[in-house]
Image (cartoon, helix red, strand yellow):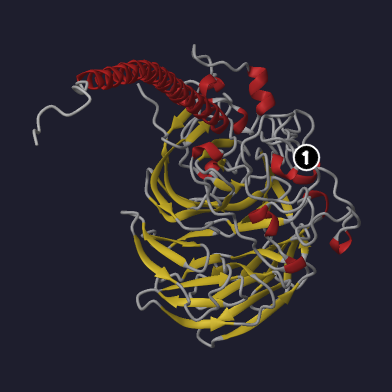
Amino acid sequence: MYRGIPPGGPQPAPANRLAELLDEVRREFEQQAAMKSETDHHMNEQFREVELINGKIYQLQQTHVEMKKQYEQEIARLRHELEQRGGAPPGPHAGPSQPPPPAIGHGPANLFQGIMTGAGQGGPGLAPPPQEQQGAPGMPGHMQGGAPPGLNVPPGPPHNPFGYNQPQGPALNGFGPQVPQSTASPGPGNSLISAGRIGGPAATTPQQIQANPYAGSPAMGGRPTPPPNGAPRYQAPDFQYTPAEIERIGNTLSDYELDRLPPHLKRQGEDWHAIFNPNPRVPRRLDVELVHNLAHQSVVCCVRFSHDGRHVATGCNRSAQIFDVVTGAQICHLQDTNTNQEGDLYIRSVCFSPDGKYLATGAEDKIIRVWDIQQRIIRHQFTGHEQDIYSLDFAADGRHIASGSGDRTIRIWDIQENQCILNLQIEDGVTTVAMSPDNRFVAAGSLDKNVRIWDVATGAPVERTEGEQGHKDSVYSVAFSPRGTHLVSGSLDKTIRMWKLNGYSDGRARSGECIRIFEGHKDFVLSVALTPDGNWVMSGSKDRGVQFWDPETGHAQLMLQGHKNSVISVAPSPIKDGNGGLFATGSGDLKARIWRYTEYRAGP
């Protein structure tokens, strides 16, 4: 059979179909390419938008950084202005906040609760955060019932720290309701104590009480001669206070603004400043400088120098520290590890034995510990107080220690016999004790506004300060003069008073003779002392200031603002050279500081 061309004729070529398929693919490719081009266009638009947003974010960041820088500069300027005016510590923008201050004491008998926590309306407390000034300075704003942050505002009458927020009624020991005490100068012709009672003329300058000469004061020799004819020192071109303003401010030196004072009336450090009294009747005698800054982990409740002046001890939460005065280095840390480690246990008082071998500490656990410094062990431990121990003082004989407690007792302890040899009871909590330089007397201040003095040998009362010449609120610190002829006391009435001692020991408590009242602190006076030559009275206050006072005239020589919170303790070094000496301060700002005061020598 012939197998040639199949029946039905030739088949159509597939080329046309292939061309159609290629055209379809080409059209789809072109369509996808067009879509890609449109997508790329949209993506580029989005990229440009993102870049624009990034640019705006960067600009906002730069603007924010600049605004933050300006804001911090303004805060620093305002803080500096506050500190110049004796104002408050830095607020929350200054960095991490410090730990909250401890609650000192216990229960209703909490002597120092207000000093450390500010609890209760009108109660004493640590210094507040900054506030805008409203009216005259006085009680910190955080005690004013929710006032906005600002400077201190006027206080109400201080309350008994044994019972904050209680109605003001009859006080302890028969004292009537407290009348608010003015811290302003009495002014000419308005002496706080009449001239007839203290044997001197009426006060002739603000905040000055003329009285009998003070043994050991500048009048006893060795003081620079004032400018002739009382020549004014405030006529420099950069001095911006009038004589009337100077008289009005008086001893309240924190009212002066640094920027308005000439260089010779101020001294400034990195975080401290001192103002020297510009009153032409108060020649500048002293200069002051910071020597060491001793940082702590808690509130520094007390400071005290050793008798040879080589060391300073501090008391804080659970421990006492001893520092080398020359280097500022901590050389000893004393802590009783056998106590309950839960909660706080503040060391309220420290004092060295005269030979420097021992350090006595008084704490909230009602125990007095006498440490062997070299061995770092407890040599003696005295128990018997029923409440917190607030004050200790070693007698000059090195054998006896005086203690004061919230249990209303003053006790004398014999280290050799290892027992209490004298227990003196009063009507209210004891805040402070001091032994006289000759070991004969012990003085105590208490919440009932009185200072009492006893004969240590017999336990007989010698003097008691009360009545019109006495303090108007609780006494928180007492100190004997170097010769033991006078006593100074500091009080919550914001004053320091100097008392002339009669030295009688016949068993009859005589009323003390107040020969000087020092006014100028804006808040509670928490600690007082005298320099070893007796030429200056020192005071530390809740207003954060330390002031040096001339005991002969009552004038404030200088005001030092060196802490950001209450100055709880001040102590001079017992050693003084011909040019000056050292003193230490302890504060609620978690710092103790060592300072040097020297005789001022004006430039040519």
Q: Locate residue 545 relative to residue 182 in the image: left or right.
A: left
Q: Locate residue 134 relative to residue 434 in the image: left or right.
A: right
Q: Residue at x 41, y 53 (%)?
A: 294
Name the residue type under label 1: Leu
Please identify the quadrant where the N terminus is shown: top left
Q: Locate residue 37 relative to residue 223 in the image: left or right.
A: left
Foreground residue among 116 and 205: 116
Helix, strand or loop at label 1? It is loop
Please identify the quadrant where the C terminus is shown: top left
User: At which x and y percent is residue 545?
Assistant: 57, 41
Please determine whether, in this image, residue 441 is positioned above or below residue 415: above
Foreground residue among 266 and 150: 150
| Residue 139 sits in quarter | top right
User: At which x and y percent is residue 390?
Assistant: 62, 66
Foreground residue among 131 and 475: 131
Which residue position is annotated with label 1?
Answer: 192
Q: Locate residue 322 relative to residue 240 in the image: left or right.
A: left
- Is residue 484 visible to us here? yes
User: At which x and y percent is residue 354?
Assistant: 44, 69
| Residue 199 sits in quarter | top right
Foreground residue among 431 and 270: 270
